[in-house]
Image (cartoon, rainbow, N blue to C red):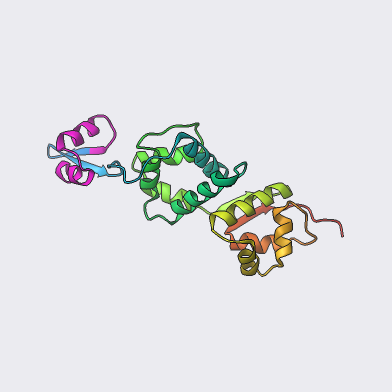
């Protein structure tokens, strides 16, 4: 993409495009004396940036791969945003907009994704969001957190998830209340539906 094409895509002047290249905000190299833009993620935002609070809790949720510690509207909105990122054909653009074109917050997996989005590494962002999810779930509390979080992100009710996994709903309720089961089968079936591979599960309850 040349400077003129980039200016049209961004809705700015060609002079502004050259300035962004000089500032390192657009990756580009010269071909025959003319700039060629390597990857165009930077553009006029299509959505309002999230508040600092919303960015912080979203980056933490992405880092922990769960909604741990979140309650009420924060929990629901963060789950919806993670689902939107996963479903998007261009999650890097979403992150760009939500962070207002600049990174902020403590360094973690979430803000690292934002860094890659700002750098134009769209393929990395897509791959990272859809990477197979492995979890060490030795503690019942960890299993409860991962199952309840992922169920909400995927927009499933307890009844729907229990039915899809072919397990009694009471078993799912026990799992989400961190109560040990007498068999690992319900947990494994539920995690399989949620596309989570457990590397460990809680010890079984005494018979």
Q: Position of residue 91 (x, y in %)?
A: 40, 49
In the figure, is residue 199 to the left or right of 8? right
The foreground one among 2 and 84 is: 84
Q: Which residues are magenta?
A: 1-28
Q: Residue at x 21, y 46 (%)?
A: 9
Q: Residue at x 57, y 59 (%)?
A: 195
Residue lying at the far right in this picture: please name it.
207
Q: Main secondary structure of the magenta part?
A: helix
Q: Residue at x 63, y 53 (%)?
A: 148
Q: Position of residue 144 (x, y in %)?
A: 68, 51
The foreground one among 46 and 206 is: 46
Q: Position of residue 122 (x, y in %)?
A: 37, 47
Magenta run includes residue 23: yes
Specify the quadrant of the image occupied by residue 116.
top left
Q: Residue at x 29, y 34 (%)?
A: 25
User: Which quadrant is the C terminus positioned in?
Assistant: bottom right
Residue lying at the far top in this picture: please name it.
23
In the figure, is residue 174 to the left or right of 39? right
Q: Is residue 67 visible?
A: no
The foreground one among 162 and 4 is: 162
Above or below — where is 15 with respect to 7? above
Magenta run includes residue 100: no
Above or below — where is 66 with respect to 105? below
In the figure, is residue 122 to the left or right of 169? left
Numbered circles on residues, count: 0
């Amino acid at each position: 993409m040349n400077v003129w094409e980039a200016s049209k895509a961004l809705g700015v002047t060609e002079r502004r495009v050259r300035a962004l290249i000089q500032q390192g905000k657009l990756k580009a190299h010269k071909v025959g004396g003319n700039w060629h833009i390597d990857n165009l993620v930077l553009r006029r935002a299509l959505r309002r940036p999230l508040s600092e609070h919303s960015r912080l809790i979203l980056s933490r949720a992405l880092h922990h791969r769960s909604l741990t510690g979140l309650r009420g509207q924060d929990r629901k909105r963060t789950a919806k945003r993670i689902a939107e990122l996963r479903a998007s054909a261009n999650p890097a653009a979403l992150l760009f907009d939500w962070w207002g074109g600049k990174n902020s917050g403590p360094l973690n997996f979430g803000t690292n994704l934002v860094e890659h989005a700002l750098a134009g590494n769209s393929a990395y962002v897509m791959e990272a969001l859809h990477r197979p999810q492995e979890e060490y779930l030795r503690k019942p509390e960890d299993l409860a957190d991962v199952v309840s979080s992922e169920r909400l992100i995927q927009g499933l009710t307890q009844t729907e998830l229990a039915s899809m996994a072919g397990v009694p709903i009471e078993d799912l309720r026990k799992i989400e209340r961190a109560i040990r089961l007498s068999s690992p089968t319900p947990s494994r079936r539920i995690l399989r539906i949620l596309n989570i591979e457990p590397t460990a599960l809680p010890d079984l309850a005494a018979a």
